Amino acid sequence: MSVLKPIYGTEVDLIGEEGAAEPFQIVAEFQLGNQAYAGLQSHDMQKEDEVAFFRITIQDGADPELESIEDDEEWEAVAEAYDDLMFAGDEQP
């Protein structure tokens, strides 16, 4: 399932706290229940192996939009789903 990559390619620009656009690589797109999510990484985040998670929303006929995840429980569930997706074949310690 990919809704962002067909429109934006492998990167999407997000507006940072200073108001400047920063490119983020689309690392993953996945479903959790009925909601779509994206894992994104800026260049600096790649160095630290960090991932930012966003909710993907689609309004009728419009391009998909990314929303910040404010709820801690939702963020934890999304992070766990991402880990399961990325490390499904790896041996668990």
Image (tube, grey):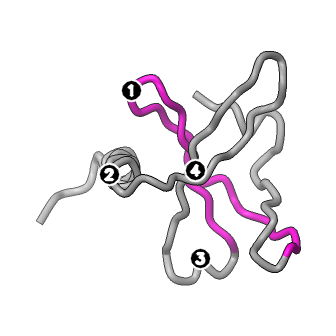
Marks 2/3: CA distance?
A: 22 Å
Q: Position of residue 58 (x, y in %)?
A: 70, 27
User: Label 4: which residue?
Assistant: 54
- Give the answer, above or below, for where 38 lies relative to 51: above
User: Label 3: which residue?
Assistant: 45
Residue 57: name its quadrant: top right
Marks 1/2: CA distance?
A: 14 Å
Which residue sits at x=75%, y=24%?
59
Marks 2/4: CA distance?
A: 14 Å
Q: Which image quarter is the C terminus in?
A: bottom left
Residue 33 falls left or right of residue 25: left
- Give the answer, above or below, for where 85 lies relative to 21: above
| Front label number (1 vs 2) | 2
| Front label number (2 vs 3) | 2
- The amino acid type of the residue labelled 3 equals Met
Residue 43 falls left or right of residue 79: right
Q: Which image quarter is the N terminus in?
A: top right
Q: Position of residue 63 (x, y in %)?
A: 82, 31
Badge 1 vs badge 2, beta-carbon distance below 8 Å: no
Marks 3/4: CA distance?
A: 15 Å
| Front label number (1 vs 3) | 1
User: Label 2: which residue?
Assistant: 73
Magenta segment: 19-42
Q: Secondary structure at mark 1?
A: loop
Which residue sits at x=57%, y=83%?
47
Q: Secondary structure at mark 4?
A: strand
Q: Which label's residue is closer to the chain start, 1 or 3?
A: 1
Which residue sits at x=40%, y=33%?
32
Q: Secondary structure at mark 2?
A: helix
